[in-house]
Image: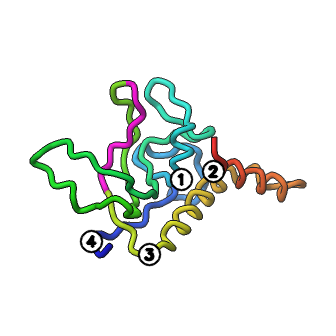
Amino acid sequence: MGSGFRCNQYPGGFTTSQSGQKTTKRSVLQMMPCTVSQLLSAMVAREVFSVGDIEVNQVSVVGIVRRTVPSDPGVDSTFVSPGTYVKVSGSLRIIQGQRSLVAFNLCCLEDLNEITSHMLEVVQAHMQHNRNLCGGGNAGDRCIKLRAECLSEP
């Protein structure tokens, strides 16, 4: 897998203001780590994707390449072979009625620990967004439920 491509670490999709106060408004350009399952079950309204109550536009996912289909004879798509684990960053779109991830960065994973790291980023981003639910009396049970929601299959 020594392709030479390396992934940059992206923030989890939440911002704070310069004064240190937390804000609920996120920039449209924030990267949100997600699972493929979350993207497949995301709600779509007016071409705006929502995972739970989080609007997402740019996401990163980790997966394994099953097959490649050359779409343009002038583009070399052979640098990623089937069976390779990759991290893909891109924008969510509806193209011809199909959910699509338009990739702007694809890099081969060099260490399988990067899969675990991505899953932790997904959980952390989800928990950070729902951090206000994890305060108070029964916080432990609510946090366990949120972790299960984040990683559950549809």
Q: SS for tag 1? A: loop
* Quarter of the image with the C terminus in it: top right
Q: As shown in the figure, which amino acid type bears the numbered disc 2? A: His
The Cα–Cα distance between marks 1 and 3, rounded to whole angstroms, is 27 Å
Q: Residue furthest left?
A: 74
Measure the alpha-carbon separation of dots 4 and 2: 35 Å
Of the image marks 2 and 1, the number of the one nearer the N terminus = 1
Q: Residues within 10 Å of mark 4 (few under 14, many from 20)?
A: few
- Circle 4 sits on which residue? 3
Q: Which residues are magenta?
A: 97-105
Labels 2 & 1 near each other (Cβ < 8 A): yes
Of circles 1 and 3, the one toward us is 3
Q: Distance of mark 2 from mark 1, alpha carbons?
A: 7 Å
Going by the numbered disc 4, the residue's amino acid type is Ser
6 falls in the magenta region: no
Compared to 107, does 53 lie above or below? above
Q: x and y percent of residue 117 in the render?
A: 53, 68
Front residue of 152/57: it is: 152
Question: Which residue matches tag 3?
Answer: 111
Q: Which mark is residue 129?
A: 2
Q: Position of residue 109 (x, y in %)?
A: 39, 69
